[in-house]
Amino acid sequence: MEDQAIQEEIQEIEYIASDELQVGAIEKYLQELPDTLIRFGVRVLLALAVFFVGVQLIKLIRKILRKSFERHNVDVGVSRFLDSFVKAVLYILLLFMIASSFGLDATSVVALVGSAGVAIGLAVQGSLSNFAGGVLILLLQPFKTGDYIRDSAGNEGTVEEVQLFYTRLITPDRHMVVLPNGTLANGSILNMSTVGDRRMDIKVGISYDADIRRAKEALLMVLEEDPGVLQEQEKLVYVEELADSSVVMNLRCYSTNEMFWETKWRLTEKVKYALDEAGIEIPFPQLDVHT
């Protein structure tokens, strides 16, 4: 009985001591709480200040890079691509610096990002392929900003911008086409702006009763008098096909890339006037039925 009483007294003493320790810990926490909040607030203010200064420095660095690109006549597409890439890298470094100021271990963060990057990479293979395609396009330059291109899928237009993952084209009817860089890098591309001039072919049908020599003279005169036709290049007017309802004539000439469409539209109109003046008939589709 005496041993049991002694044990109960010991337990009671331990319980009281435990309560006193908990009360002391709470009192200590409450006493240190203002200092902790002040230190945390100072860190937040410092982090905001670092972020603000970092953003301004990033803008300054990008401005210096853009001016350097302009001085060295770097292609517009390359300069925009590098500007976007440098911006992304600098912002990532800035966020790492701010995270380190809150006590996060940079090595642990890098390891975590690296392990997560493998899973993310598998999930976004298409985007990574587009990014790699954008790098290849800028390095190999199969086309550049301002070129008129057509891809293997039939999309065509003037290159407006080569971005990190996509290339933007402006079509002749002023629509925007966004193409993935991975597809462009791995497919065939027809670049119509690599050479300074461009060939055009205009087909027109004349009647079988018409004088072909007279028609050729009238059409050749149209090519020789048009200011958009490059006179030093070859100019041809020839019979393309003996079709069902007409003799198909083809006008072949060359124009600059800038004047191509304007010249083609103007020549198409002039062809009609020239044939009318020469008395050459442009027949309608017809079918002779014999009974």
Image (cartoon, rainbow, N blue to C red):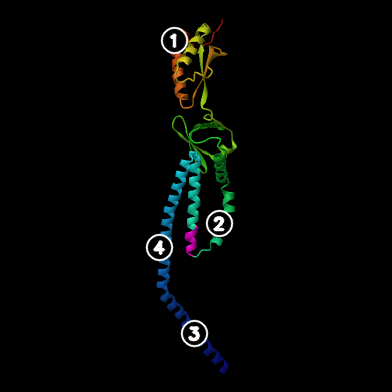
> Real-space Cα distance between discs 3 and 1?
116 Å
3 or 2: mark nearer the eye: 2
> Real-space Cα distance between discs 4 and 3?
41 Å
4 or 2: mark nearer the eye: 4
**Residue kind at label 3, given as amino acid type:** Ala
Relative to residue 36, is residue 8 depicted above or below?
Answer: below
Say which residue label 1 marks: 276
Rate crowding at label 3 as few (under 14), some (14 to 19) or many (20 or more) other CA atoms within 10 Å: few
Q: Which of the marked residues, 4 or 1, is nearer the chain's N terminus?
A: 4
> Real-space Cα distance between discs 4 and 2?
26 Å
Say which residue label 2 marks: 113
**Residue kind at label 1, given as amino acid type:** Asp
Where in the figure is residue 195, as x and y percent of width and height?
Answer: 53, 28
Q: Which of the marked residues, 3 or 2, is nearer the chain's N terminus?
A: 3
Of all residues, the one furthest to the bottom in this rendering is: 2
- Residue at 55%, 43% (x, y): give it: 135
Q: Nearer the viewer, residue 242 or 16?
A: 242
Magenta residues (range):
96-102
SS of the residue at dot 2?
helix
The C terminus, quarter of image: top right
Q: Is residue 50 visible?
A: yes
Asked if marks 4 and 3 touch (Cβ < 8 Å), the reply is: no
Where in the figure is residue 183, as x and y percent of width and height?
Answer: 57, 38
SS of the residue at dot 3?
helix
3 or 1: mark nearer the eye: 1
Asked if marks 4 and 2 touch (Cβ < 8 Å), the reply is: no
Say which residue label 4 marks: 45
Relative to residue 66, is residue 225 depicted above or below?
Answer: above
Where in the figure is residue 73, as x and y percent of width and height?
Answer: 48, 39
Q: Main secondary structure of the magenta part?
A: helix
- Which numbered dot is residue 17? 3
